Image (tube, rainbow, N blue to C red):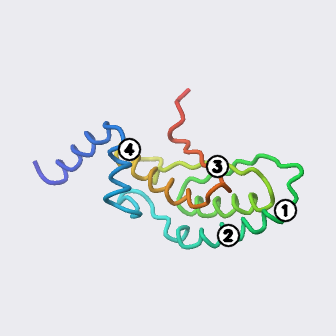
């Protein structure tokens, strides 16, 4: 058995065990994007400034009648744009939800281990928005 086949088999097995991918992403990969996912480096760099500006603007906004808004991002550049848009809406006083899918491509099969690592990475990055955004991972929704 070659190295790639062994790695693929191990990922398949670990993908079935609870919390293995999440713990691997948190304690071994430490803020690195999964190799078969996408990186959000620009978002990581920009998010602290955006959150600070949105928090300041929100404190000045009139919050008499707030509406709920859901913004969805899927591919890497859409996630960056949708996150910025979500923070702008939150700064205006809207209760903003941010929905995302942790898939890099919709055409290929993704190992459960890789998908859960990408999800953990995205939640860690997007979680830096704090209470301004309510995160919704659409890949965990039960099928109908």
- Alpha carbon distance from label 3 to label 4: 28 Å
Residue designated by label 2: 52
Residue designated by label 4: 109
Q: Is residue 95 above or below residue 128?
A: above
N-term-proximal mark, 4 vs 2 = 2
Q: Is residue 103 above or below residue 80?
A: above
Check if mark 4's residue and mark 2's residue have beta carbons within 8 Å.
no
N-term-proximal mark, 3 vs 4 = 4
Element under disc 3:
strand
Residue 134, which numbered label?
Answer: 3
- Alpha carbon distance from label 2 to label 1: 14 Å
- Alpha carbon distance from label 3 to label 2: 17 Å
In the displayed structure image, the side of residue 42 where residue 8 appears, left or right: left
Residue 61, which numbered label?
Answer: 1
Residue drawn at x 49%, y 57% is 124
Residue drawn at x 77%, y 46% is 68
N-term-proximal mark, 3 vs 1 = 1
| Residue 110 screen position, x and y as percent | 38, 46
Q: Image quarter for residue 133? A: bottom right
């Amino acid at each position: 058995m070659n190295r790639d086949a062994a790695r693929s088999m191990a990922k398949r097995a670990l993908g079935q065990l609870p919390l293995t991918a999440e713990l691997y992403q948190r304690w071994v990969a430490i803020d690195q994007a999964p190799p078969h996912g996408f990186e959000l480096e620009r978002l990581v760099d920009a998010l602290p400034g955006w959150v600070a500006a949105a928090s300041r603007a929100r404190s000045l906004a009139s919050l008499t009648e707030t509406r709920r808004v859901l913004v969805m991002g899927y591919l890497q550049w859409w996630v960056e744009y949708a996150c910025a848009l979500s923070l702008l809406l939150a700064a205006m006083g809207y209760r903003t939800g941010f929905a995302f899918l942790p898939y890099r491509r919709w055409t290929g099969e993704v190992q459960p281990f890789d998908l859960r690592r990408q999800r953990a990475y995205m939640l860690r990055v997007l979680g830096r928005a704090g209470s301004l955004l309510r995160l919704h991972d659409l890949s965990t929704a039960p099928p109908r």
